[in-house]
Image (cartoon, rainbow, N blue to C red):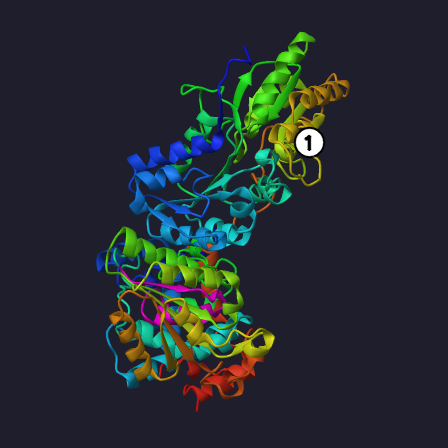
């Protein structure tokens, strides 16, 4: 493939375009603005459907919960802001009013990662994946380019339940096409190979492909996987890659603590333990600078992926031991995982027990007689 | 599985759905069961008759119409009894706030204020209530049971494993009448504002949204984001009630973190504000009527209440914020509420 010939467009434009597309086909789509509608591209929706756009102001906690209220009224609300403020500042709102409440709220987290550039560390969210993937009921997508961001936005709007799409500010190469397969929850193998698996998400997928091309010149045949949906994780594709390739390198524009790489490691250690190297931000904050320069400085480029591949290949075992049948986190065999839903046996038994134990000691039975 | 357990489940299910289960279904189910295990059915039926005699949970629910202020007082007392009963069985939970706000809930649900149908809890165009102060749910549960949303006996499952009556409202448990999960303070109010935006500005219907917050809850910053938005969007279909008992876990609201003055704050956020005695049913009815007539502004009803109202040893005592009565205290409370002599 010729890596030079692709145009560059930011993923946030894909989000904005996807929103307009959704708005045209579904009247239930409403969008909430948090004062930065021009930067996260909700402006396009606002221009086209002013009646279905509500400006909430710089109040991300309120916007998230208002979205929950709209969802409880049958709407499909999208709220977009910078990831720093719509994934973490509103963390409890996401946890309770969106995820526990199982409301059909979609969040667009813009300006994610270090590539925000000159705005500096306060606005460079590098911890959102770690939090969001720990939330039950959440679907988390990190699209790799403009086209995939559009598809992911539309897919989130069509799916029922809490969803989050993470996109970036800077323009990055547009290397997928309209006909490139995209299904929520299904990782795509972008390049076949059997020596090492490079699993990436977001803008790092491009870097992974670049690295794979370089590595092929050294005779290393790398498989590149676009793990756009970090949650729910496509365990099948990840573990198959571990078994086939024997070593893995993950790459993400996020802290390596708790990010996509951690999710991959958890699935791999459980099912087919193989050595893994992690490319990402290493437990440090970002800072101001030119986005491209920052990506270099923080090691989020293909050459660092190549370094990690060389490193991990040295640890490759002839044979993987401890391979298990593929299981998802929380699958049967790991103890009870679900709180009982009402009208199951639990409730009726408890109800009966409560009645048997009533009245409690010291409260005579006649206290139960109604007076009115 | 123990055949008695199966019978128990079927029996309990049928008993609690008597109004919706036709006689023929009853006969069919019991007829076939009689053939299979006659002795168990006899014993069980006998047992359940014995129970019903002592079970006040089977009394008819109160209807959704405008009850007189005097009748509302009785209903509020009945709600208070149910709160005490459910808390003493639960052995944990919040007593003070629920007892103190029983009069507000009685007026809201049985004063002809809200448009709701317990037989069709998700009816299109209904008025909705969001309990932003989620820890006060015992009063909401007792009110909903008294309105006929679910059997009153279910109140005895409060806070137990698998119960639909979670320690703070959980929508996932599907308890009829619960519009949303809440309990992380401040969030319910924003959800209610979202609902009001949907009703007034998207669907453009006549439905109204009510939400109750505590006064300590007003210390949450996001409350004022919600208040700002309600005023900004001129949500005259939105009515919030502040349960102003001046108590929170650590002490008096003014001492823990002063939120006063309230009236001026809400007015400056473009709210129509009404101060009212939260134990005066006639005044509460008038306040809710006034809220409905206001155009172009949301309404905030600041209801002055006493925590633990109706139970002498809990009244206006902030230490009763988050604990249940023990057996002896419950007996005393029920005596004061006119159940025991």
- Is B290 above or below relative to A277? below
Magenta range: B126-151
Which of the chains bears the disc numbered 1?
A
The residue indicated by pointer 1 is A298
Q: Residue at image x 36%, y 49%?
A: A54
Residue at 42% across, 61% down: B228
Where residue B27 sits: x, y (%)? Answer: 25, 58
Q: Is residue B145 visible?
A: yes
User: Which is more toward the observer, B39 or A61?
Assistant: A61
> For numbered disc 1, what is the local secondary structure?
loop
Assess whether residue B134 is covered by the magenta stretch: yes
Query: How many dots with numbers?
Result: 1
- Outermost residue toward the bottom? B341
- Whether residue B133 is in magenta: the answer is yes
Q: Quadrant of residue A327?
A: top right
In the rendered image, the quadrant that contains the C terminus of chain B is bottom left
């Amino acid at each position: 493939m010729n890596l030079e010939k692709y145009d560059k467009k930011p993923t946030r434009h894909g989000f904005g375009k996807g929103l307009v597309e959704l708005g045209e086909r579904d009247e239930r789509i409403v969008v909430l603005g948090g004062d930065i509608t021009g930067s996260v591209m909700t402006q396009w929706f606002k221009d086209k459907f002013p009646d279905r756009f509500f400006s909430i102001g710089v109040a991300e906690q309120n916007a998230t919960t208002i979205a929950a209220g709209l969802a409880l009224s049958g709407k499909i609300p999208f709220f977009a802001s910078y990831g720093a403020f719509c994934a973490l500042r509103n963390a409890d709102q996401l946890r309770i009013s969106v995820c526990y409440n199982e409301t059909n709220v979609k969040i667009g987290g813009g300006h994610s990662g270090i590539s925000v550039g000159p705005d500096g560390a306060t606005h460079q969210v590098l911890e959102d994946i770690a939090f969001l993937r720990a939330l039950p009921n959440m679907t988390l997508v990190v699209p790799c380019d403009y086209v995939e961001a559009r598809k992911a936005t539309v897919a989130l709007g069509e799916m029922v339940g809490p969803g989050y799409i993470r996109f970036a500010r800077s323009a990055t190469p547009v290397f997928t096409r309209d006909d490139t397969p995209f299904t929520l929850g299904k990782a795509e193998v972008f390049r076949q190979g059997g020596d090492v698996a490079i699993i990436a998400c977001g803008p790092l997928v491009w870097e992974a492909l670049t690295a794979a091309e370089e590595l092929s010149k050294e005779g290393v045949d790398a498989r590149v996987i676009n793990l756009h949906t970090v949650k729910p994780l496509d365990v099948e594709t990840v573990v198959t890659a571990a078994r086939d390739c024997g070593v893995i390198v993950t790459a993400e524009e996020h802290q390596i603590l708790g990010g996509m790489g951690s999710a991959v490691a958890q699935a791999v250690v459980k099912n087919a333990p193989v050595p893994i190297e992690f490319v990402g931000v290493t437990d440090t904050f970002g800072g101001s600078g030119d986005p491209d320069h920052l990506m270099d400085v923080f090691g989020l480029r293909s050459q660092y992926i190549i370094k990690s591949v060389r490193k991990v290949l040295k640890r490759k075992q002839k044979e993987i031991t401890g391979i298990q049948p593929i299981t998802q986190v929380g699958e049967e065999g790991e103890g009870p995982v679900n709180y009982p839903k009402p009208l199951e046996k639990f409730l009726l038994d408890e109800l009966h027990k409560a009645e048997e134990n009533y009245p409690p000691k010291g409260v005579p039975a006649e206290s139960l007689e109604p007076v009115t | 599985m123990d055949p008695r357990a199966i019978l128990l489940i079927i029996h309990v299910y049928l008993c609690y759905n008597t109004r919706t289960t036709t006689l023929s279904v009853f006969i069919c189910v019991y007829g076939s069961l009689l053939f299979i295990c006659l002795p168990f059915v006899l014993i069980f039926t006998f047992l359940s008759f014995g129970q019903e005699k002592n079970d006040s949970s089977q009394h008819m629910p109160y209807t959704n119409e405008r009850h007189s202020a005097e009748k509302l007082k009785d209903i509020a007392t009945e709600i208070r009894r149910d709160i005490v009963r459910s808390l003493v069985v639960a052995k944990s939970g919040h007593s003070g706030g629920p007892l103190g706000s029983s009069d507000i809930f009685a007026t809201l649900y049985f004063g002809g204020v809200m448009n709701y149908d317990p037989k069709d809890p998700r009816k299109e165009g209904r008025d909705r209530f969001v309990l932003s102060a989620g820890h006060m749910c015992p009063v909401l549960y007792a009110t909903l049971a008294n309105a006929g949303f679910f059997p009153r006996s279910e109140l005895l499952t409060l806070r137990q494993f698998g119960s639909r009556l979670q320690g703070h409202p959980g929508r996932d448990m599907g308890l009829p009448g619960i519009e949303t999960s809440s309990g992380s303070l401040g969030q319910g109010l924003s959800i209610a504002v979202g609902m009001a935006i949907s009703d007034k500005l998207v669907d453009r219907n006549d439905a109204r949204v009510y939400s109750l917050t505590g006064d300590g809850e007003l210390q949450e910053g996001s409350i004022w984001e919600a208040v700002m938005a309600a005023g900004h969007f001129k949500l005259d279909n939105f009515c919030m009630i502040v349960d102003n008992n001046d108590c929170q876990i650590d002490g008096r609201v003014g001492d823990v973190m002063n939120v006063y003055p309230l009236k001026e704050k809400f007015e400056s956020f473009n709210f129509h504000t009404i101060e009212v005695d939260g134990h005066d049913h006639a005044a509460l009815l008038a306040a809710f009527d006034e809220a409905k007539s206001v155009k172009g502004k949301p309404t905030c009803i600041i209801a002055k209440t006493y925590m633990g109202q109706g139970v002498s040893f809990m009244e206006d005592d902030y230490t009763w914020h988050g604990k249940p009565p023990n057996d002896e205290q419950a007996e005393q409370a029920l005596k004061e509420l006119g159940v025991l002599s």
